[in-house]
Image (spheres, helix red, strand yellow):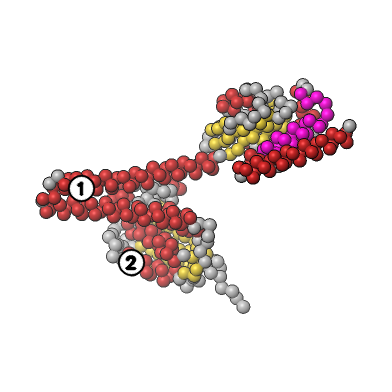
Amino acid sequence: MPYSSGIKALVALGIVAAGALAGLLLNGDVQTSLVMLVCGVAAVLVATAGGDPAGPLDTAPAVAEGPGIAEVLEAIAEPVLLIAERRVIAANSAARTLLGEHIIGEDVRVAIRHPAAAEALLEPGNQEPAAPIHLVGLGTREQRWEMRVQTLSDGRRIVHLSDHTGSYATERIRVDFVANASHELRTPLASLLGYVETLEDGAGDDPGLRDRFLKIMHGEARRMQRLIDDLISLSRIEAEKYRAPDNPVALDELIDEVCLELSGAPRAADVVTEIAETLPVRGDASQLSQLLHNVIGNAMKYGREGTPILVSLVPEGDSMVRLSVTDQGDGIPPEHLPRLTERFYRVDPGRSRTIGGTGLGLSIVKHIVERHRGRFDIASAVGKGTTVTALLPVIAVIKT
């Protein structure tokens, strides 16, 4: 009876929802629980729609076109397809955007043009959830997808595609970071060990040679110290990035302090300041000081000898200030500009290491600006110089 079928359908839907909720509570995976719910709802809708659920393929589109299945599929943000006898009978908008509007009615191996997907979809359906299939290059060459296939009770299958490009990129960055940090620490450490062994073998008996070796060892140890300090700073800034600082900081006074501290540094250049009257910045004084040390210090290191460094601070509208540091150095080729804030990225590795760069300075600056909810930009012209700009929010004055 229709009434009895309706009661059964409601009970079945309740059981499916309870199972999905239990899965969510147990493993915390929202997408997997949502797909479980879709699979269960689809099975109930198909089972209660009347007719033979295991019938020939030409009756499947009539079932798939029911508003229940279509609406459930559309509720999922990631691509989901419903297939029967290896043909796509329904797909949500995310799947059609990724694979094309033409996929409805096509062989699923044609719709998802990937060897690993085709091999998995040729296997007979199994009620047990299959292991995820990793697909590289589906959509664009850089994208990484994970495909899961779930078989329904009537033999039809749900194909769920999950975009893992972001997590893959994050893992790649982590691996590169660990490799680069290890390399940067290993190089001075190997140098230190080599000089220690040489001194132990008798070179220390020559006062002049001993002093020269000790000077080199001191430089290598300071290089390691700078790198470790930068790594700790970067880790601390990233840990605090979701907590915006809100202390008032007089940036004009901080600029004067930093310029005075850097005036005795090697390769020190004349620093010309153009500071307009501005409101205090909403920020963290120690991190803003670190930002100024890195940016002005870089301008001093890479600017041409005998040329001045220009530091300017001007209002930018009612809510921001613009901090700019300009040098008259050799400039940076345009192909390097997008990567300057990557950790350990150097335009000229040899020159950077010679003048004491760790390869983390601009990455630290970018994270500090982001934590302050500001904007960061680097503009450069080869042969003319480089300008680094940071827009930072100020503490608004309440007008009465």
Q: Nearer the viewer, residue 208 or 148?
A: 148
Task: Determine the main secondary structure of the stretch shown in magenta.
Answer: helix
Crowding near pointer 2: few (<14 within 10 Å), some, many (20+)? few
Q: Nearer the viewer, residue 299 or 283?
A: 283
Crowding near pointer 1: few (<14 within 10 Å), some, many (20+)? some
Left or right, 327 with respect to 37, comes to left
Give the CA distance from mark 2 to mark 1.
33 Å
The residue located at (24%, 54%) in the rendering is: 218
- Whether the residues at callouts 2 and 1 have beta carbons within 8 Å, the answer is no
36 is within the stretch colored magenta: yes
Callout 2 secondary element: helix
- The residue where tag 2 is placed is 261
> What span is colored magenta in the figure?
34-54
Callout 1 secondary element: helix
Quadrant where the image shows the N terminus: top right
Res 327 quadrant in image: bottom left
- Residue 105 seen anywhere in this rendered image of the structure: no
Q: Nearer the viewer, residue 50 or 13?
A: 13
Marks 2 and 1, the one that precedes in the sequence: 1
- Amino acid type, label 1: Val
The residue located at (59%, 28%) in the rendering is: 117
The residue located at (22%, 44%) in the rendering is: 194
Which percent across, then down, holds residue 74? Answer: 71, 40
Residue depth check, mark 2 versus mark 1: number of the one nearer the observer? 1
Res 81 quadrant in image: top right
Quadrant where the image shows the C terminus: bottom right
- Residue 85 seen anywhere in this rendered image of the structure: yes
The label number, if any, that marks residue 365 in the structure image:
none
The label number, if any, that marks residue 196 in the structure image:
1
